[in-house]
Image (spheres, helix red, strand yellow):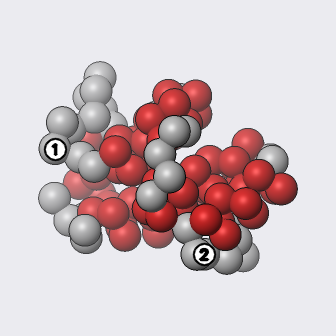
């Protein structure tokens, strides 16, 4: 699976695809409206890819200070796009990994 429509189609299922990376699973749960489950999956991870998803989740939560901390950990800048656009960019990035 390499496309955003394919990823979004999986969101009709009750659980994410077991082959998804932890980052994609987190984004999947967030896309289904379960921010807490999304956060729980990556909360204790310190690698840069997980930090990037963590940053997005805190930005979505409205916790800009915490989001900026995680963006720095991910070596990324907080984007000047909508949350929906950032979610799609993240999903596409991780689908290509």
Give the quadrant of residue 10.
top left
Inter-mark Cα distance, 1 to 2: 26 Å
Q: Nearer the viewer, residue 82 or 74?
A: 74
Residue 31, horizontal then vertical, whole percent: 48, 42
Kindly identify which residue carries mark 1. 19
Left or right position of 79 against 35: right
Q: Residues within 10 Å of mark 1 (few under 14, many from 20)?
A: few
| Rendered residue at 77%/52% (across/down) | 66
Asked if residue 53 can be seen in this view, the reply is no
Kindly identify which residue carries mark 2. 76
Asked if residue 49 can be seen in this view, the reply is yes
Residue 59, horizontal then vertical, whole percent: 72, 53
Q: Nearer the viewer, residue 84 or 65?
A: 65
Where, quadrant-wise, is the C terminus in this rendering? bottom left
Q: How many marks?
A: 2
Residue 76, horizontal then vertical, whole percent: 60, 75
Give the quadrant of residue 56.
bottom right
32 versus 45 height, above or below:
above
1 versus 33 height, above or below:
below
| Rendered residue at 28%/49% (across/down) | 21
Residue 81, horizontal then vertical, whole percent: 67, 72
Classify mark 2: helix, strand or loop: loop
Q: Residues within 10 Å of mark 2 (few under 14, many from 20)?
A: some
| Rendered residue at 27%/63% (across/down) | 95
């Amino acid at each position: 699976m390499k496309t955003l429509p394919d990823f979004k189609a999986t969101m009709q299922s009750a659980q994410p695809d077991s082959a998804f990376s932890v980052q994609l699973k987190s984004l999947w749960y967030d896309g289904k409206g379960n921010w807490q489950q999304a956060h729980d999956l990556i909360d204790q991870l310190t690698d840069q890819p997980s930090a990037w998803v963590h940053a997005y989740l805190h930005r979505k939560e409205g916790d800009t200070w915490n989001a900026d901390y995680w963006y720095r950990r991910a070596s990324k800048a907080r984007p000047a796009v909508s949350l929906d656009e950032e979610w799609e960019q993240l999903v596409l990035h991780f689908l290509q990994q």
